Image (cartoon, grey):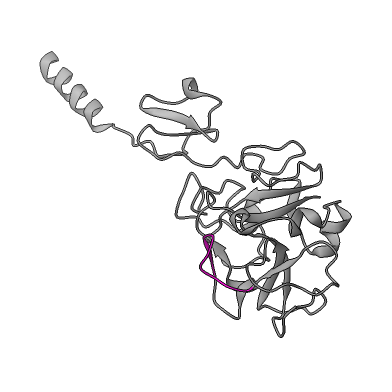
Amino acid sequence: MRALAACALAALSACYSPTIEDGQYTCIDDNGCPEGFRCDCKLCIRLSSPSQICFDGPCTASPSNSRAPVDPGLDEIAFCQAAWTLPGVKNPPSCEYVPGQSGNKISDTKVPCSIADNCAPGWHVCNDDAEVAAKGLPSDKCSGMNSTNGFYVTRQAVKLMSNPVSCNDPGDTAVIGCSSPLSSMPSTDCSVLGYALSGCGFNSFNCTPGAVASTLTRGNAMASGGVLCCKD
């Protein structure tokens, strides 16, 4: 009987084999993760899983590893590497501010992140040229960029009726931001932001032509470009 009981207990124990998913546990370092996992972006992920870009405070006053190489190091505005899969530039956060490299939530890749998740709590996607100017970004930090620096978008959407376009002509066909001459240059009524993103399919930006502001996504935070984040 004792042998049978022991076998039954062993069988019951063998049935319990929990599966630990990437991001199920938070951590400070590797010592805080289960065996076979490492600490990456304050989340435990499998040793075999690819590394993530850490967005655990991407746009704070001090530059972190998610600020872009071209970031000017200002206290109230940041050039942030970014990716998101929820289309559009107007959406609120949707994945608790933890976007992974491809634009979905780090701990659950079925959850799409929005553009806003790329700005840390206490920050937001810069609304327009006027706010960027008020936060102290010099115009030469945009006009001095080249094509390898990518494009950094704001929420400001305009019509693309002519070249140059106007910051005072709201629409959906282009998004104002910081870049080099990758698309169309806004008119001089933009005081800081020099260009409008009107095309799709470069630097990991994807969209529907003619509806850029409402359909824009970005599939790779490692590529040059991203989003301008402003401090609340």
Q: Main secondary structure of the magenta part?
A: loop
Please indicate, yes or no, whether residue 86 appears anywhere in the rendered image: no
Taking depth in this image into account, of 186 and 89 the one nearest to the observer is: 186
Membership of 53 in magenta stretch: no
Q: Give coordinates of residue 66: x percent, y percent.
A: 62, 42
Taking depth in this image into account, of 94 and 61 the one nearest to the observer is: 61
In which image quadrant can residue 134 be found?
A: bottom right
* Number of dots carrying numbers: 0
Which residue sits furthest bottom? Answer: 161
Vertical placement of 161 versus 222: above or below? below
Q: Give coordinates of residue 210: x percent, y percent.
A: 60, 81
Q: Which stretch appears magenta? A: 198-206
Residue drawn at 49 percent across, 41 percent down: 52
Looking at the figure, which quarter contains the N terminus? top left
Residue drawn at 59 percent across, 55 percent down: 148
Taking depth in this image into account, of 214 and 92 the one nearest to the observer is: 214
Vertical placement of 163 versus 67: above or below? below
Please indicate, yes or no, whether residue 179 appears anywhere in the rendered image: yes
Membership of 205 in magenta stretch: yes
In the picture provided, is 22 more to the left or to the right than 163? left
Q: Give coordinates of residue 104: x percent, y percent.
A: 50, 53
Q: Give coordinates of residue 132: x percent, y percent.
A: 82, 57
In the picture provided, is 51 more to the left or to the right than 80? left
Which residue sits furthest right? Answer: 134
Vertical placement of 156 versus 171: above or below? above
Vertical placement of 205 versus 165: above or below? above
